[in-house]
Structure formats: C-alpha cells, structure tokens
Amino acid sequence: MDTTEFDQMFVNVASFILPAWGIFVGTVFFFGTIAKVAYPEKYDELTTRAEKEAIKGKLDLDNLSEDDLAAVAELEAEMKAKGKM
C-alpha cells in the first residue's frame, strides 16, 4: 500500500497548523505581557476573578468558627471602606 500522498498531505497540513499555532500563542503571550506591565491592577483582577469565584463556591459559611466569622466581618468592613463591596 502506497501512503505517499497521505504522508505528503499530513506534512503540508502540519507545516501550516504548527506555525499558525505558534503565532497565536506568541501573540497571546506578547499582548498578555504588555497588559500585565501596563495595567497590573486590572490584569490581576481579571486573571484572578475566575479563581475567586471557584473558591467562593467551595466555602461553607454555615460552619465557620467564631474567629473565622470575626475575620470575615473585618474583611467586609475593609472592602466597604475601599468601596469594593
């Protein structure tokens, strides 16, 4: 069985897809780096939002200790003072 045509097609497709993928990843890295340097606060907020939501979903606020409740109240007061809540 001769697979020369398939082999040639595979090489042609790979020679297009791999550089295109490299350009895409490089572009994302390049602009992400610029965004992180130019706007560090906004970048950190955007990149950690999903992580914060995931952690928030795992918290069980019904079983907090007294110390934890005090810490939560203190954090809420601090966030309200900064205008983030």
Image (cartoon, rainbow, N blue to C red):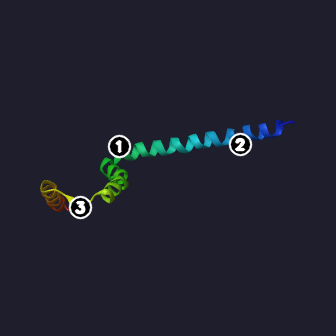
Instruction: Give whichever of 33, 11 is nearer the camera.
Output: 11
Q: Nearer the viewer, residue 63 or 33?
A: 63
| Upstream in sequence: badge 3 or badge 1 | 1
Name the mark on residue 57.
none
Rounded to the nearest angstrom, the CA distance separating label 1 from label 2 is 36 Å
Q: Quadrant of the C terminus?
A: bottom left
Q: Mark 1 — residue?
A: 37
Q: Is residue 28 left or right of residue 71?
A: right
State the SS at label 1: helix
Q: Residues within 10 Å of mark 2 (few under 14, many from 20)?
A: few
Image coords of residue 32 (percent x, y) = 43, 45
Of marks 2 and 3, the one in the foreground: 3
Point 74% across, 40% down: residue: 10
Dot 2 lies on which element? helix
Q: Mark on residue 61?
A: 3
Reply above or below: 11 against 70. above
Residue 84 in sight in this render: no
Chain-order first, disc 1 or disc 2: 2
Residue type indicated by callout 2: Val
Q: CA distance from mark 3 to mark 1?
A: 36 Å
Badge 3 marks a residue whose secondary structure is: helix
Question: Which x, y percent locates residue 14?
Answer: 68, 40
The relative height of residue 57 versus residue 27 in the rendered view (above or below) is below
Q: Quadrant of residue 56?
A: bottom left
Q: Is residue 39 left or right of residue 6?
A: left
Amino acid at the residue labelled 3: Leu
Q: Which residue is mark 2?
A: 13
**Quadrant in the picture for the N terminus:** top right
Q: Nearer the viewer, mark 1 or mark 2?
A: 2
- The percent coordinates of residue 78 (x first, y second) are 15, 57
